[in-house]
């Protein structure tokens, strides 16, 4: 024989045990409270930071004379970009005219023109 409760069987489920609306309101209240705590902590930390910065002594003159970048050789932050820039500069040099040494009269010519000149000299 199965155990039956006549009061709850007709309604389908018990409505008096769980108040979903109240649970959602408590959850929303907790979320608002957490956001408020974070906001208060943010302003408190900003106040402490500005008070600490005001207490620090001025930087010594030697510190202002230091270079902005570290000395060479520096580590590459983007090796792929550096290689791309190097290849582009090399290609620009290979495919353009320019002077190497003005006094000595040394110039560089595009690689295609240099090969034509060499082929012309070899055929003579």
Image: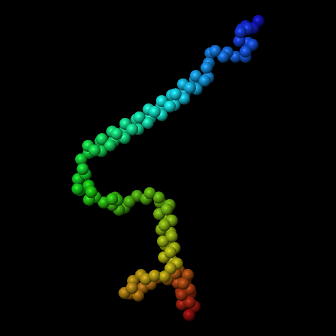
Say how many tags the image has. 0
| Vertical placement of residue 70 versus 123, above or below | above
Q: Nearer the viewer, residue 45 or 101?
A: 45
Q: Residue at x 51, y 73 (%)?
A: 91
The C terminus appears in which quarter of the rendering? bottom right
Q: Residue at 39%, 38% (x, y): give it.
A: 43
Q: Position of residue 96 (x, y in %)?
A: 50, 79
Indicate the position of residue 14 as horizontal and vertical percent values.
67, 15
Residue at 44% from the left image edge and 32% from the top image edge? 37
User: In front: 120, or 44?
Assistant: 44
Q: Is residue 109 visible?
A: yes
Q: Residue furthest bottom?
A: 124
Q: Is residue 112 rendered to the left or right of residue 41?
A: right
Q: Is residue 104 above or below residue 37?
A: below
Residue 105 is situated, as x and y percent measured from the top left of the image, at 41, 87
Classify 14 as above or below 50: above
Residue 122 seen in render? no
In this image, 62 relative to 78: left or right? left
* Location of residue 62 by image quarter: bottom left
Q: How is the image coloured?
A: rainbow
Task: Write the residue at 46% across / 33% down.
Answer: 36
Figure quadrant of residue 42: top left
Side (left or right) of 72 relative to 115 = left
Side (left or right) of 69 relative to 80: left
Q: Nearer the viewer, residue 76 or 63?
A: 63
Q: Quadrant of the N terminus?
A: top right
Instruction: Farthest residue to the right: give it.
Output: 1
The picture places residue 85, in percent across and down from the top left corner, at: 48, 67
Residue furthest top as drawn: 1
């Amino acid at each position: 024989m199965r155990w039956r409760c006549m009061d709850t069987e007709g309604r389908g489920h018990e409505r008096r045990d769980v108040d979903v609306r109240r649970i959602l309101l408590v959850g929303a209240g907790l979320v608002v409270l957490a956001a408020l705590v974070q906001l208060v902590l943010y302003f408190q930390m900003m106040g402490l930071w500005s008070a600490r910065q005001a207490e620090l002594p001025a930087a010594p003159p030697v510190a202002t004379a230091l270079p902005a970048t570290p000395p060479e050789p520096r580590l590459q932050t983007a090796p792929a970009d550096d290689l791309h820039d190097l290849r582009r500069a090399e290609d620009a040099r290979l495919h353009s005219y320019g002077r190497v040494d003005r006094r000595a009269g040394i110039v560089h010519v595009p690689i295609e023109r240099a090969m034509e000149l060499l082929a012309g000299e070899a055929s003579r």
